[in-house]
Image (spheres, helix red, strand yellow):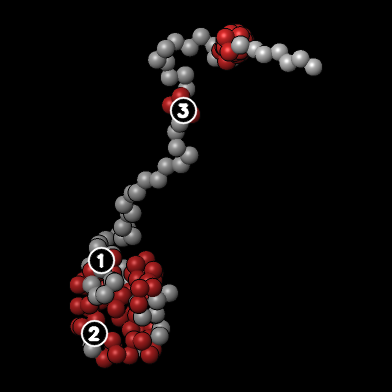
Amino acid sequence: MAQKQHSSGAILFITIVVALLLIVVIWPLAKLGKGSAAVGSSDDADARIQPVARFELAKAAPAKADGAPRDGATVYQTVCMACHASGAAGAPKAGDKAAWAPRIATGAAALLASVTNGKGAMPPKGGGADLSEAELKAAVEHLVGLAK
C-alpha cells in the first residue's frame, strides 16, 4: 500500500475552505430570530437583567396610636421580648427567678438606669429609642413582676 503524502499547503487550503464554509452556513443561522434591532436599542435587555428580588429597609411606625404611654406588657411584647424571651446575647429570660434575683436586689432605680443607658449587648432603651421614661419604668416593673 502506497501512502500518499499531503503537502502542508494543501492542508492549509482545505482548512481555510472548511472554515469559510462553516462561517457562510453558521452566520445566517446566528442572525435568525434576532429581527432587525437597531444598534443601541435596549431590546428589553433592562428587563432581562433585573434582580430577582429587591429588599428595602423602612422605619417602622411607632406603636403609639393615641399618644398615651404604653403599659409594661405592651412594651415587653414589642421591644423587650426579642431578647428576654429566648435569653439572646446573655439577657436574663423573663420569669427566670434565679437570673433576676441579683438584678432585683440592686433596686428598681438601678434596673431603670441599666435599661435607659444600655448594658452589655442591650442598647440604650432596649433598642426602643421612642420609649418614654414612664414606658421604660412600666416595662422594668413588668419584667420584675414576672420574676417574682
Q: Quadrant of the N terminus?
A: top right
Q: Nearer the viewer, mark 2 or mark 3?
A: 3
Q: Which mark is residue 95?
A: none
Count of numbered marks: 3
First along the sequence among labels 2 and 3? 3
List the single residue furthest toward the front. 2
Please state the horizontal and vertical placement of residue 38, each as a whole percent of the image.
44, 10
Residue at 23% x, 84% y: name it.
108
Residue wearing tag 1? 131
Residue at 46% x, 28% y: name it.
47
Please state the horizontal and vertical placement of residue 82, each as a whole percent of the image.
39, 68
First along the sequence among labels 2 and 1? 2
Residue density around tag 2, few if under 14, some if 14–19, many if 20 or more, within 10 Å: some
Give, as a three-letter code, the residue at label 2. Answer: Ala
Please state the horizontal and vertical placement of residue 110, each as a whole percent of the image.
20, 83
Please state the horizontal and vertical placement of residue 15, each as a whole percent of the image.
59, 13
Disc 3 from disc 1: Cα separation: 44 Å
Q: Quadrant of residue 83?
A: bottom left
Residue wearing tag 2? 108
In front: 1, or 61?
Answer: 1
Residue density around tag 1, few if under 14, some if 14–19, many if 20 or more, within 10 Å: some
Residue wearing tag 3? 47
Q: Could you say whether the residue bearing mark 1 is in a helix, strand or loop? A: loop
In front: 26, or 77?
Answer: 26
Q: Quadrant of the C terminus?
A: bottom left
Q: Could you say whether the residue bearing mark 3 is in a helix, strand or loop? A: helix
Residue at 28% x, 71% y: name it.
122
In front: 21, or 143?
Answer: 21
Q: Nearer the viewer, mark 3 or mark 1?
A: 3
Up the image or down, 74 lies above or below 140; here it is: above
